[in-house]
Amino acid sequence: MNLLVLNCGSSSIKFAGFEAPPLVCRLRGEVEAIGNPGARLLVNGRVVPCQAEDHRQALEVVAHALQQEGWPTPQAIGHRVVHGGAKFTAPVVIDERVLADIEATVPLAPLHNPPNLEGIRLAQRLWPQAPQVAVFDTAFHQTLPPRAFRYAVPREWYQQLGLRRFGFHGLSHAYVAKRAAEFLGKPLNALKLISLHLGNGASACAIAYGQSVDTSMGLTPMEGLVMGTRPGDVDAGMVLHLLTQHRLSIQELERALNFASGLKGLCGLSDLRQIHAAIAQGDEDAQLALEVFCYRVKKYLGAYWAVLGGADAIVFTGGIGENDPKVRELCVWGLEPLGIAIDPNKNRQIGRAVMEIQSPGASIQILVIATDEEREIAENVLTLLEVSP
């Protein structure tokens, strides 16, 4: 079987082509900066300028690139869907009812589910004969116990409105947990792990014996860790204060919390590479942004160590988690009493899919694992379609 995986974001489409069995990735690419003059196609290490004014054009670029690479018509297509609500706890073959249910979750993930839906509908038109499968970022967290997913708000909000913690980045957390177990040579169901997906979006996850038992993102992808342009945890009273005392409109507040907060709100920059450069030039706001980002991660590390009653390993992943040694160092600084310490030399390693970076004698192993959400999607699709990976 040849399988196409599509990961449609607000301004990009990542794609990967797999063959199975055995599951082997033959093709990877991305259309970046959709809607901008600088849109470009990256495919198998090559960079090609392209015209992608919208997702329709971008997916046509993907289809043409697949043809140019000699990729056959896909026999199945897997789609990443960020929010599946409480309804979807596993991958599902997409039909009109599934599309309607995904549409109903758009208010909970307004930045993510609309492009996911657009990618599905466009793929259905381009490849009408291939079964289309939705794989949900929220599904991995459906094992959260009520004490972790319930908010302490009027119970009618949960019972009638369905307001609860869902969690996100489930595909990434699930993937790196499995890779960590393989690297450590132990069954996943024998391990307690803390997974840190650090990127423009960031979340922490406590994983007990293969199941997510707590995670930092909540009803929406805004809660928890500090992110590139999202604030993470904030006092709900502050939101009310801005609405009632400063007369911000709902639209102004939503835009500020989604696009002008987090690292960008603290120092005007959302990319940690730029923040490090600004720090080197003496920018105090940039220094504070770095410290706030890492401090929040450290708080969640300590909290999840307590939730799990200790941990066998901590996993750093995501664009920042995989590539920023300084962030990793600051996130665990001072946690030696918990058995968490990084070896400075090991921490500077680069270029390996899995790295072990804890200090000698530390009781908790610290791993850096390159995430692969597309492969996780592919594995889920094959399981659903009963094809051996």
Image: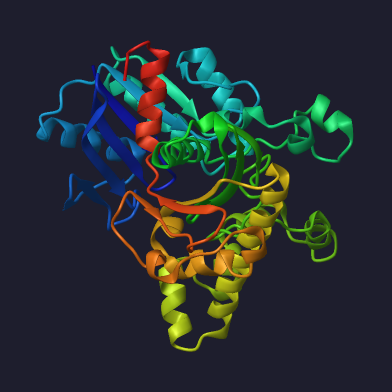
Q: Residue 109 location, x and y as percent?
A: 58, 39
Q: Residue at x 58, y 80 (%)?
A: 285
Q: How is the image coloured?
A: rainbow
Residue 200 seen anywhere in this rendered image of the structure: yes
- Total marks shown come to 0
Residue 121 seen anywhere in this rendered image of the structure: no
Residue 226 or 177: which is nearer the viewer? 177
- In the image as oriented, which residue stretches furthest toward the right? 154
Q: Residue at x 43, y 71 (%)?
A: 344
Q: Residue 75 location, x and y as percent?
A: 26, 16
Q: Residue at x 80, y 30 (%)?
A: 158
Q: Is 193 located above or below residue 159 in the figure?
A: below
Residue 291 or 278: which is nearer the viewer? 291
Quadrant placement of the C terminus? top left
Classify residue 153 as left or right of residue 351: right
Quadrant placement of the N terminus? top left
The answer to which image quadrant residue 85 occupies is top right
The answer to which image quadrant residue 38 occupies is bottom left
- In the image as oriented, which residue stretches furthest toward the front? 361
Q: Residue 88 location, x and y as percent?
A: 58, 22
Classify residue 114 as left or right of residue 216: left
Residue 133 or 287: which is nearer the viewer? 287
Classify residue 295 as left or right of residue 324: right
Q: Is 124 located above or below residue 249 in the figure?
A: above
Q: Residue 6 location, x and y as percent?
A: 35, 33
Q: Is 332 located above or below residue 286 in the figure?
A: above
